[in-house]
Each structure stands twice: as C-alpha cells, then as structure tokens.
Image: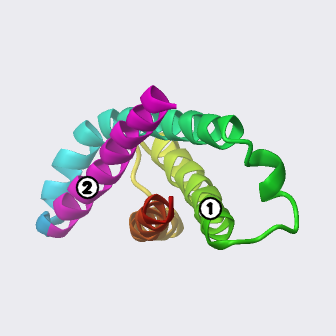
Amino acid sequence: MGWVLHLHLVAAIAWIGGAFFMFVLGVSLRKKEDQEAVYPRIGPIYGYFETGALAILLYTGYTMISDNGLLKILFSDIGNEVIDALRIKLQLVAVIFILTVIHMTISLLTIDKRKTPRQRLFSKASSMGIFLLNLVVLHYAMVLRDTL
C-alpha cells in the first residue's frame, strides 16, 4: 500500500494545490479583459492536469479501500469513527466529481465562445463548490489519518 498512498497524496496535492492557484488567480484578476486573456490559455492546461489528478485520486482511493477490505464494510450497517469518516469523505468526493463534470462540460463547450449568463453561473458555482468541498475532504482525510 505504500506506493499507492504516496501516489494518492501527490495527486491530492496537485488537485487541491491547483484549486488554490485558480482561486487566487480568479480573485486577483478583477478586470474582465485580464480574465479573458488568461483563462482561455491556462484553463485547458489546468483542466487536463486536474482531470489526470482526479483520475489518480479515484484509482488510488479505490485501491486502498479494496486492499484494506473496506469495500464490503462501506456498504454494510457497520459504523465506527473510521468508517463513518470514510463514508462522508466518499460522499463529498462524489459531489466533487459531479461538479467537476459540470464545470468541465461547460468549459469545453465554451472554450472559443462567450458563456451565457446561465453557463457562467453554473461554471462559477461548480468551481467554487469544488474548491470549498476540497477543504472539507482534506479535513476528513486528516481525521482518517489521525484515527489510523
């Protein structure tokens, strides 16, 4: 499990670090002209990088759960501090995954176009949701590590 955990941690650093970077970039670029100059160039690179990190996180997370015999326990009535924290973390990851699909779909559909107000709303809301939920997932990851 050693290499899987390390790969999971590196992917988590990339995923959450990228989200922090994009958040800071979004806050610091106040002018619409600056945003229109930067996001079309950096957005696709960031999107592919983050998709790779998410794929690694999902694969390594599943591998660790499976290798530790937790798959059946997660879908049972058994509950304790570790299993409950893991269930919450996985539910949050599912929401993040859905928000990521929404955000990526809008981004890919509008890469060379201007977003409609509705697309802009869903894109920004999903992006902010991903960012905030990442922090909560990070909390539950620390709870799991402290408990184990």
Amino acid under disc 2: Met
Left or right, residue 11 beside residue 75: left
Q: Are marks 2 and 1 in contact (CB under 8 Å)?
A: no
Residue 120, image x, y percentages: 44, 65
In the image, is residue 10 part of the stretch drawn in magenta?
A: yes
Q: Which residues are magenta?
A: 1-27
Closest to the observer, 128 or 71: 71
Look at 32% across and 39% down and name the residue there: 46
Report the mark closest to the observer, 2 or 1: 1
The residue positioned farthest toward the top in the image shown: 3
The tally of labels here is 2
Q: Secondary structure at mark 2?
A: helix
Look at 39% across and 39% down and name the residue there: 11
Look at 46% across and 68% down and name the residue there: 143
Look at 31% across and 46% down and name the residue there: 13
Placement of 120 over or under 66, stated as above or below: below
Residue 92, image x, y percentages: 59, 65
The residue singled out by tag 1 in the image is 86
Image color mode: rainbow
- Asked if residue 127 shows in the view, the reply is no
Rate crowding at label 1 as few (under 14), some (14 to 19) or many (20 or more) other CA atoms within 10 Å: many
Left or right, residue 86 beside residue 137: right
Residue 111 placement: quadrant: top left
Amino acid under disc 1: Leu
Residue 14, image x, y percentages: 31, 42
Mark 2–mark 1 Cα distance, whole angstroms, equals 27 Å
- Asked if residue 144 shows in the view, the reply is yes
Predominant secondary structure in magenta?
helix
The residue positioned farthest toward the front in the image shown: 148
Left or right, residue 36 beside residue 136: left
The residue singled out by tag 2 in the image is 22
Residue 26 placement: quadrant: bottom left
